[in-house]
């Protein structure tokens, strides 16, 4: 409320519950917190809450991962992909004294978006035993009440890749592009985005492929389909 006081109410399911508001003007922030890889950082105002991937406060590592500095900021943290996150913000809600509760319906909007990634092979897919990947230049956090993502970027590591008849595919969640407003597309985006693929071959050898997917991500700042092709594992490998 205008005095800077705020309450936190937790609901056990999507049907909601009763919230006690201060009389007068209130700003209301709703979001799901049933997450495993997201932490919430609250500022002086209760509505100015920012969501981070849990690893944003400490670096997640993968022994085999080496950043491609052509497409990746050397200062980027490596993080887990965030869980699904939804939020809704209502400012200036006027609360008055009533004898009973007043119905208030809220439709939550997504703040985490999904990229479907296709790695298409030309040759050598039969030699691949295990595949893992990474996507760099993605937003490290998001403001819940505006949907604006942080200027600071992070590299998302993902291990759950599926080997298919055309190559490898992965489903990767992200807050989207950095410094991006949730309500319209930006006129500029200077962030580079790199995609990598690590494949462990059946003979135990590790081979890494790197791709520049800047144009694809900039055209799809809130999720989409990313395709890279022409991948070849040489027989001598």
Image (spheres, rainbow, N blue to C red):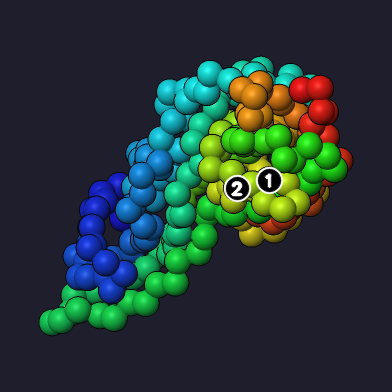
Is residue 2 something one can see in this rendering? no
Q: Residue furthest left?
A: 99
The residue at the point 44 percent across, 30 percent down is 55
Q: What x and y, as percent, mark residue 178?
A: 64, 40
Residue 44 as seen in the image, left or right of residue 221: left
Vertical arrangement, residue 226 with respect to residue 26, above or below: above
Residue at point 72% right, 40% down?
Answer: 126
Q: Kindly identify which residue carries mark 2.
A: 162
Residue that carries the numbered disc 1 in the rendered image: 168
Disc with the residue nearer the chain's start (1 vs 2): 2
Structural crowding at the residue carrying mark 2, measured as other residues with C-alpha within 10 Å and reported as few (<14), some (14–19) or many (≥20): some
Residue 144 location (% of width, % of height)? 46, 51
Residue 180 place in picture, x, y as percent: 66, 46
User: Height in image: 30 above or below 118?
Assistant: below
In the picture, which quadrant includes the C terminus?
top right
Is the Cβ of the residue at disc 1 closer than 8 Å to that at disc 2?
Answer: yes
Residue toward you, 81 or 19? 81
Q: Which one is in front, 200 or 64?
A: 200
Counting from the top left corner in percent of width and height, residue 8 is at 24, 53
Which quadrant of the rendered structure holds the N terminus? Answer: bottom left
Which numbered disc covers residue 151? none
């Amino acid at each position: 409320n205008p005095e800077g006081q705020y309450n936190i109410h937790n609901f056990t399911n999507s049907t909601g519950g009763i919230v006690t508001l201060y009389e007068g003007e209130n700003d209301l922030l709703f979001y799901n917190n049933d997450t495993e890889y997201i932490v919430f950082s609250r500022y002086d105002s209760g509505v100015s809450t920012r969501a981070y991937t849990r690893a944003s406060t400490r670096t997640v590592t993968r022994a085999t991962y080496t950043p491609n500095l052509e497409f990746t900021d050397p200062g980027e943290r490596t993080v887990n992909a965030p869980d699904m996150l939804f939020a809704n913000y209502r400012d200036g809600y006027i609360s008055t004294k009533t004898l009973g509760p007043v119905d208030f319906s809220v439709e939550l909007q997504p703040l985490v978006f999904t990229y479907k990634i296709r790695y298409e092979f030309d040759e050598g897919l039969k030699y691949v035993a295990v595949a893992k990947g990474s996507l760099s230049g993605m937003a490290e956090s998001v403001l819940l009440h505006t949907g604006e993502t942080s200027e600071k970027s992070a590299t998302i590591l993902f291990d759950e890749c599926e080997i298919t008849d055309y190559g490898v595919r992965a489903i990767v969640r992200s807050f989207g592009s950095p410094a991006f407003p949730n309500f319209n597309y930006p006129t500029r985006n200077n962030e580079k985005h790199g995609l990598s693929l690590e494949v462990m071959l059946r003979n135990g050898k590790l081979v890494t492929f790197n791709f520049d997917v800047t144009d694809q991500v900039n055209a799809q700042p809130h999720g989409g389909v990313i395709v890279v092709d022409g991948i070849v594992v040489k027989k001598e490998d």
